[in-house]
Amino acid sequence: MWKPPERIKHSLPEATWPTREQAAGSRCFSPIEIGSVTLAERTWVPAMVPWRATEEGFVTPEVLAWYERFATGRPGALVVEATGIRDVPSGPLLRIGHDRFLDGLRELAATVRRASGGRTRLFIQLIDFLSIRRRPEPSKFLQRYLEITDRHRRALGADLSDDEIRELLLELPASRLAEVLSERELEALKFGARERVTDVDQPHIRELPQVLPGLFGAAAVRAQQAGFDGVELHYAHAYTMASFLSALNDRADGYGGSRQDRSRLALEVYRQVRRSVGANFVVGCRYLTEDCLADGSTVEDACFFGAEFAKAGLDFLSLSRGGKFEDAKPPKIGRAVYPYTGPSGYECMPTAISDAQGPFGRNLSPAAAVKAAVRNAGCTTPIVVSGGLCTFEQAEGVLERGEADIIGAARQSLADPDWFRKMRLGRGEEIRRCIYTNYCEGLDQMHKQVTCQLWDRLDLEADDVARSKDGKRRLTPPPWSPEDAQQQKDS
């Protein structure tokens, strides 16, 4: 992962944990309404992809154990990982693009409800993504995948057959090859071929605005049938819907260019989802406060989008930042490009090694601007913020200053799924604190089962501990309960 050139090592924020009485009187542990449901507290576990589904996208026992473990921490809300809305192969990522996935999703919703005692509201994140291929072997790319055209012949000054042109290309030094190949061909060689929403010469890309609202609507109906409390529409990072919102989207068909046109599909998707599920099912979205790219979307764009989304009726807005393909590092041969390896990816998941600003609360100022824009539009839509939030003082300060309405924490919740509950019970000194090395992100990049270095080797020899495929890591954190912890303290 990219690191800021300053490479300043930041210590964890000092933490003074509340007593049980202080927590009970806090903003953090007060209820809040989101659409048709009420969260018991303003704590939120954002979507994280743990790579535990089957290759066909079905719920597995490992998926159930993962979400059960977060549910025992009883946060106000838990968002299930990005779940594909198309019925297409997508590796060990959950899918919701067909009714055959319903039984597993029903079991998942029931598991969370049971493990949280009905306290945690459960949402599922719905995602669409375009095709992306692994970085090819150069010889294989030039011999098999590259489509030879007259442009290549002109660049080489040779009127030869396709096979002869390929042989010439194989012999070229890298600098000369870069002159002969087009920008997209060179990208396909160095990164792997990647579709963009602006590839409107391709019919299936051109028709996305006609196709996606129905796919999202059908997926939301399945989520409703499976027993979820709502859906989170994935409009963030490197994927289809975020790419429509991005300032880099220059489609000329009414779905790109101006802010109004770039937000058009996002609003059409929402309206179709709302028509499909009715008024008593939560529909929110996650989107970016900034692309964190040259010429990408800015905070001003995010403020415009937030006001439009809120006026349209979305029930919550969950804010992230960065995480784009455009500035990602080239992957190793045989692997796909990962959108969190460049500067924009760093902004999404900053580490303890940072610039002077540091990694903690890096998204707060942009989130506050979005919330102000939403309130100025006359809307009370709850704003969820995340990004290096890991202490009670941080959370309470965010809510007190009005920068956001709900506190999201992914990596800290992965380090300790019980951390919100421990704070609420006055047991903050028992919290296992994330150290922000992005060990988990490294596993995600490799599509390995995601764990945390702070707990994945604990009690590994126990017979009842489920292990990773290589047997070297446990798959869920050790259990915790107030009663067991007190007994250990007393013994």
Image (spheres, rainbow, N blue to C red):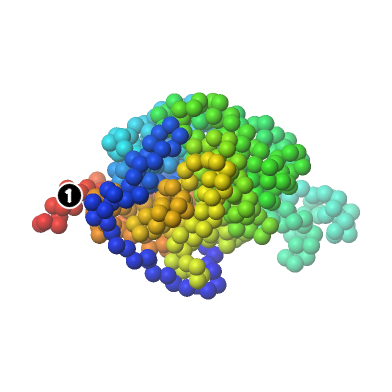
- For the view shown, which residue lies furthest in the left direction? 491
Q: Position of residue 283 (x, y in %)?
A: 50, 35
| Residue in the foreground of this view, choosing between 293 and 471 | 293
| Residue in the foreground of this view, choosing between 115 and 367 | 367
Q: Which residue is mark 1?
A: 484
Q: Position of residue 371 (x, y in %)?
A: 52, 49
Q: Callout 1: few (<14), some (14-19), or many (20+) C-alpha neighbours within 10 Å?
A: few
**150 to the left or right of 30:** right
Instruction: Examine the rendered structure and indicate whether residue 27 appears above or below residue 33.
Output: below
Asked if residue 178 can be seen in this view, the reply is yes
Q: Quadrant of residue 397?
A: bottom left
**233 to the left or right of 451:** right
Residue at image coords 49%, 27%: 279
Q: Position of residue 90 (x, y in %)?
A: 54, 40
Helix or strand or loop: what does disc 1 sit on? helix
Residue at image coords 39%, 41%: 32
Q: Quadrant of the C terminus?
A: bottom left
Q: Position of residue 13 (x, y in %)?
A: 37, 65
Q: Which three-letter amino acid code belongs to the residue tagged 1?
A: Asp
| Residue in the foreground of this view, choosing between 408 and 477 | 408
Residue at image coords 43%, 58%: 388
